[in-house]
Amino acid sequence: MSRFIATTHSGSLPRVEALDRANEERGRLSRDGILPGNAADVDYDRIVAQSVDQVVQQQLDDGIDIVNDGEYGKTVVSNIDAHAWFGYIEQRVSGWQVFDHPQSAEEQVPSTRSALRLSAHGQRRDRIRFHDVYTDPTSGVRITKQTAFPRITGPITYIGQQAVSRDITNLNTALAKHPGVQGFISSISPGSASRIDNVYYATQEELIWAWADALHEEYQAIVDAGLILQIDDPSLAENWDQINPEPSVEDYQEFTRIRIDALNYALRGIPADRVRLHVCWGSWHGPHTTDIPLRDLIDVLFEARVGAYLLEAGNPRHEHEWQVWEDVTLPDDKILVPGVISHCTNVVEHPELVAQRIERFAKLVGPDRVIAGTDCGLGGRVHPHIARAKLRALAQGAHIASERLSQPSRSTLARNQQ
């Protein structure tokens, strides 16, 4: 039978070696002020286009329905390692410089709505609790050492028109070979983008709203191109761990609501059903004992004007939170995209386990309102061969779940036989 539980993933996919080399070289040339316009830049564009075409085909071969460009077009500033996952946006805005040391929490500008402030990354409560683990290179917990720190020193202005246009063109060109297939492109949220140093804007709100203004242009371009916009915002959940000491839930909800308000402003004029929001508790492979429970965050997340939520549901710290949906009602105009495949383990999930995870959510919110996804991006977190095996297990599990969910329940059959 045909499968009706659709599949997707959270964005990042492992890069091919040629693209890794080209991306590293482009980052070096950009930092040296050589780009754009030289031969290496042209060669990079060619490699990215070819790689996107290949990764779209691979996703479809592996059974993924809603695909993306693997985030292959997002060049990062490699010496700002701690920000590598969103470092691409620093190449698409003006108003920032690199410094060799971070600001302290005491140096941060105040907020007009919240007394909470983010601590340094090294002062995360999970890292303090497991200091010996995070500082032991043999522990298996990978934390990249940061060697440079971006800082906002002038007005934030979007200058990434050419870059986002290239992302759009590459993905739409690849999709043109597969009529009817939906594609998405990820973009950072104002809240996550604003988690860098700032000495220009007078308040946190001014900084976040400046990011919202700049990012609106990227959001609009993606949606205008007929693609789904995925907002990546781990900050909504993982900021909790970076506030030390631990705040009250109520104070943190207000702190987070500021970021949701800015996101809604950045999404102005964009239909909610063209937007999905990816929220996670950070992608690092660590204990995560200080993660905020989903139950304490979900009502604030519902305030975002988006059509779908991608939430972690497959890793050992958050899988149990499927039970939240026994008490929480998913709004009628929303879709749930639970992560039924995790980025935090090299073990490839059995398709039967994937099916069971999907069925839990389908029975609580309705099978027509569930899309099967991944906890977080797989790129850089598992070996490329494991990543593809996980995506195939995702598709196989969705097929099993679709078959079972389409069959009448035993109680229904019994009633019909009476």
Image: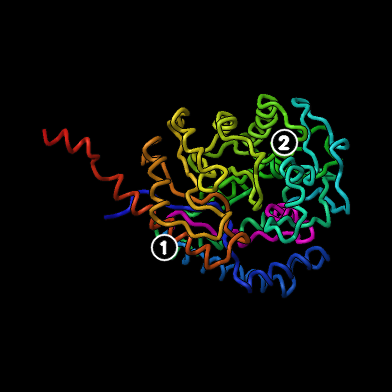
Residue displayed at 64% across by 39% down: 291
Q: Which quadrant is the N terminus positioned in?
A: bottom left
| Highlighted range, magenta | 64-92
Q: Which residue is pictured at 85% across the width and 47% down the height?
A: 102
Q: Residue furthest left?
A: 418
Q: Toward the viewer: 401 or 114?
A: 401
Classify 39 as above or below 336.
below
> How many labels, in total?
2
Q: Please provide percent x and percent y for residue 352.
A: 38, 53
Amino acid type at circle 2 is Trp
Residue 12 lies, with reference to residue 240, above or below; the image says below
* Residue under numbered circle 1: 178
Q: Quadrant of residue 381?
A: bottom right
The residue labelled by disc 2 is: 209
The image shows residue 206 at horizontal and vertical percentages of 77, 34
Depth check, front residue: 38 or 24: 24
Residue 265 visible in image: yes
